[in-house]
Image (cartoon, rainbow, N blue to C red):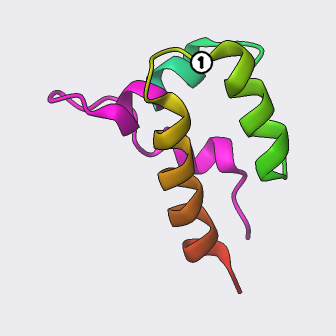
Amino acid sequence: MHQSFYQFLLTHRGKLDQDDYSALADWAFYDHHFPQYATTYDEISDYLEWNSPFPSALSTFDALWSEYEWKYSS
C-alpha cells in the first residue's frame, strides 16, 4: 500500500537530536492545516511556501520528497 507524503514525513518525528527532517515532521504534525492527503509535489510545496516554519523548510521538503518518490516509485 502506498503511503501519503504526510505519513512518510511522520516517520521522521520525535528525534532526541533534532534535525531539519524531524523539525519539519514535528511541525506538520502540530499544524492542523497541513495538507495530509495531498498527492502532488506542487500542492505541498505551495502550502509550505505560504506557511514555512523555518528558513530551510522548502529545501528540506525537496530532499524528503525525493526520498519519498524513490521509496514509492513502483
Residue 64 in the image: x percent, y percent?
A: 50, 52
Q: Vertical placement of 67 versus 33: above or below?
A: below
Residue 51 lies in what quarter of the image? top right
Which amino acid type corresponds to the residue marked 1 in the rendered image?
Ser
Of 35 and 58, nearer the camera is 58
- The residue that appears at 65% across and 41% down in the rendered structure is 6
- The residue that appears at 70% across and 24% down in the rendered structure is 49
Q: Quadrant of the C terminus?
A: bottom right
Residue 68 appears in the rendering: yes
Of 58 and 10, nearer the camera is 58
- The residue that appears at 15% across and 30% down in the rendered structure is 17
Q: Specify the segment rendered in magenta.
A: 1-24
Residue 37 appears in the rendering: no
Describe residue 25's horizontal placement relative to residue 52 as left or right.
left
Residue 27 in the image: x percent, y percent?
A: 51, 18
Q: According to the image, label 1 marks what residue?
A: 52
Residue 21 in the image: x percent, y percent?
A: 39, 39
- SS for dot 1: loop
In the rendered structure, does residue 47 fall within the stretch colored magenta? no
Describe residue 33's horizontal placement relative to residue 63 as left or right.
right
